[in-house]
Every structure is written in structure tokens, then in C-alpha cells.
Image (tube, grey):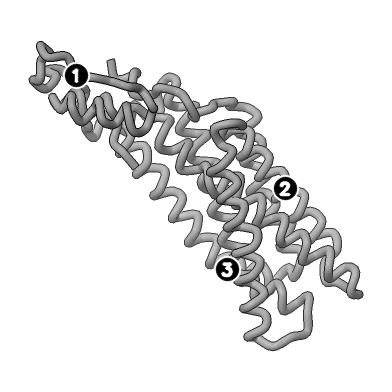
Amino acid sequence: MNESPVWAANQGDLQGAAAILRKSYNINAVVAEDADLKPAVKVRKAAWRNYGTLLQGVYLRRTVLATVTAVASSFAYNAVAFGLPVILSTFLAQSMISTILVSLALNLLFAFVGGLIAVRYVSKFGAWKMTVAGYACQLVALIVLATIGRPTDGAEAAISIGMLALFLFGQGFGPGSHTMTFASLSYPTSLRGMGVGFNQTLMRGSSTVSLFLFPVLAAALGTGVFWVIALAPLAGLIVLTAIRWEPSGYDVDAEDF
């Protein structure tokens, strides 16, 4: 992943900035012979006070959107993905090895493939639409899983496994692929490090809470735990509906000037 061409130009590396434009943006940029190669004198520097900037003006909306989608995605995915062997063992009577292999197969066939689809089509549909679609798939899957509960026959077991696959597929092409897009492309270069760091801190905290709570809630609620997990994609959908920010294709680095 190349650095920002604006950042490179501000450091006086116009040749590097031109190379980034040619490689990443397909712009045939050429540095003029009389170009000033001195670094920009006045560039907004990273500072601790920039944390406050993340919660001001237009950045407040972007920070809320990036944070909620990241936390919701991390909470739901970690609960389901890492708890998948436990979930499958309640659906099917099989050995632990078979359960683990089925878990790996579901992740590979649906989460991984969903991620490849996201990379292929994000430029066409945008990160916002794909994240909304991903959360919608997850919400439907979790509601169906909670409604079915413990399958009583082969048909219900097949539907439940299909819903787990739908959840993982939605994670792959939706929030799993785009939460970092929102975190990275919501801020210009001077704020990006702060913004991404803040986002990742909260997301990792959500992962830890999810990994701790899922076994506890699963033991207490059984398959009713899916109702609790469903709150995560629901929260993501609510915030995405309220804040319609599309970071893909937007020149956020221009906001440094």
C-alpha cells in the first residue's frame, strides 16, 4: 500500500509523489524541471490535541461511524467465528476434529471468498453500501439462528449451518473488509495515525469483551445468545443509516490544506 502522494509532496519528494500518482491513480504525473523540491513549510503535524479534533465538526460523525462499525463487527465476528466449534457441536453430533474442520471450511468458503468479492467490487459499489449489505446478511442470519434455536431435525440443522455461512459471507464482503477503510480514509494524513489508533484500540477491546462474554452468555442463554449477538449488526446498520459517509474515492488528504 503506497503512502499518500500529498504527504510525499509535502516532504519535498515530488518524484515519489508523481510515482505514486502513476502507480496507484493511473495519472501520468511528471515533475516540472523548475519545481520547488523543498518540503512544505506549514503542514499540520500530529499532536496529542488531535484526539480532540477527532471529536469535532465533520470528524465527529466519521469517528462515530468508523468506531461503531469496527466495534460491532469485531464483537459479532469474534463471538461467532471463535465460538463456531461450540455452536456446531450443538447442531451436529460429531467428533471434535470434524467440528473444527467444518469450522475452517465455513470460514474459507464464505468469509474468505466474501473478502475477495469485496476487493473486486468495492470500487463499483462503495464501502458504505457493501458494509450495509454485510450487516443486513448478518442480522438476518442471527435472527434465524436465534429463532430456530437447537435444531430438531436435519432440515433445521442444514438451515442453521446455512445461516452461519451467510453470517461469515456477510462479514467477508461487508464490515470485515471495510471497517479499516472507514478508519483510514475518514481522516487526512495529519490525523490518520490518531484516528486509526483510536479505532483499533476500541476494536481490540471489543474483541476481548466478545471472547470473554460469548462462552458465559452461551452457557447461560444457550442458543438465545444469538439474540444478544444480533444487537451488534443492528447497531452497525443504525449508525450507517444515520451517517451516510462514503470514504471510497474521496480525496480526504485535501483537508490538510
Query: Residue 228's x, y, as percent?
Result: 69, 56
Judging depth in this view, the residue of 104 and 25 nearest the camera is 25
Residue at point 67%, 83% (across, down):
98
- Sequence-earlier tag: 3 or 2: 3
Residue at point 40%, 37% (across, down):
184
Q: Which residue is mark 3?
A: 82
Tag 3–tag 2 contact (CB < 8 Å): no
Count of marks, rendered view:
3
- Sequence-earlier tag: 3 or 1: 1
Query: Residue 48's x, y, as percent?
Result: 24, 35
Residue 127: numbered disc: none
Image quadrant where one finds the N terminus: top left
Image height check: is 51 above or below 164?
A: above
State how far apart marks 3 and 1 are (Cα).
51 Å
Image quadrant where one finds the C terminus: top left
SS state under label 1: loop
Choose mark 2 or mark 1, whichever is in front.
1
State how far apart marks 3 and 2 are (Cα).
19 Å
- Sequence-earlier tag: 2 or 1: 1
- Give the amino acid type for the residue marked by disc 1 in the picture: Val
Within 10 Å of disc 1 (Cα), the crowding (few <14, some 14-19, many 20+) is some
Left or right: residue 90 compared with residue 176: right
Query: Residue 105's x, y, as percent?
Result: 64, 70
- Give the amino acid type for the residue marked by disc 3 in the picture: Phe
Left or right: residue 90 compared with residue 16: right
SS state under label 2: helix
Q: Which residue is mark 2?
A: 137
Q: Which residue is mark 1?
A: 31
Left or right: residue 122 compared with residue 31: right
Query: Residue 171's x, y, as percent?
Result: 61, 51
Judging depth in this view, the residue of 9 and 69 nearest the camera is 9
Within 10 Å of disc 3 (Cα), the crowding (few <14, some 14-19, many 20+) is some
